[in-house]
Amino acid sequence: MDTKLNHLQKDVIRTAKKGFPLVLSGAFIFFIIALFPFFFSMKIVGVIWILALITIFPLGVAVGRCMKINVLVIENPIGILAAVVAAPQAFFIPVFILVYLQIPEYLPFTIGLLTGSHFFPYVWIYKSKTYGFIAFATSVSSFILGVFAVDQAFFVVPLTISIVFSIGAFCIIRELRNE
């Protein structure tokens, strides 16, 4: 059983390249989100945030296709597990809308914390310490900056997430080269 599980994990790691295009997509989208407060009123920024988050996955799939990386490894049970682990993110959207409507200043904190926490299972799925870093650094920085720098959170939280994801993308490339 262990041998087969190991083989399935290695296949997903090789085929999906540890989800690298999705992390890269997230880095790009969160960087763009960080710029929104400079161009739009804060009332509009929260709505744009929520809509922009929806683009991360399809953009990541498109980036993967351009790079000839299949991030949707649905013919492999571990690939299906990766998709199942990612799917709850879609159900967070109503939470984000509620936070935006009730306490909009905590939207960056909420989005960052929930986004970061969803990466923990990928430590095992992709045999990657980098996903532990992404999960921890995104969650902790979103909490600290989203709570203690609340007045600048719509800029500093997504910028920090973008930096964490960029570092993560670099580290994933390094992990792939070392395998």
Image (cartoon, helix red, strand yellow):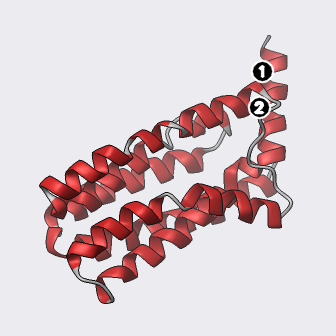
Asked whether, in this view, residue 21 is left or right of residue 109, the answer is: right
Q: CA distance from mark 2 to mark 1?
A: 6 Å
Residue 73 locus on image (x, y percent): 78, 39
> Residue drawn 53% across and 63% down?
165
Q: Which residue is mark 1?
A: 5
Are the residues tagged 2 and 1 within 8 Å (C-beta)?
A: yes
Q: Helix, strand or loop at disc 2?
A: helix
- Please name the residue that numbered disc 2 is placed on: 9
Q: Residue at x 51, y 70 (%)?
A: 29
* The N terminus lies in quadrant: top right
Q: Amino acid at mark 2?
A: Gln
| Other-residue count near label 1 (Cα within 10 Å), few / some / many at <14 / 14–19 / ≥20 | few
11 or 132, nearer to the observer: 11
Vertical position of residue 123 compared to residue 138: above or below? above
Tell me residue 5's x, y (percent).
78, 21
Is residue 173 positioned above or below 28 on the image? above
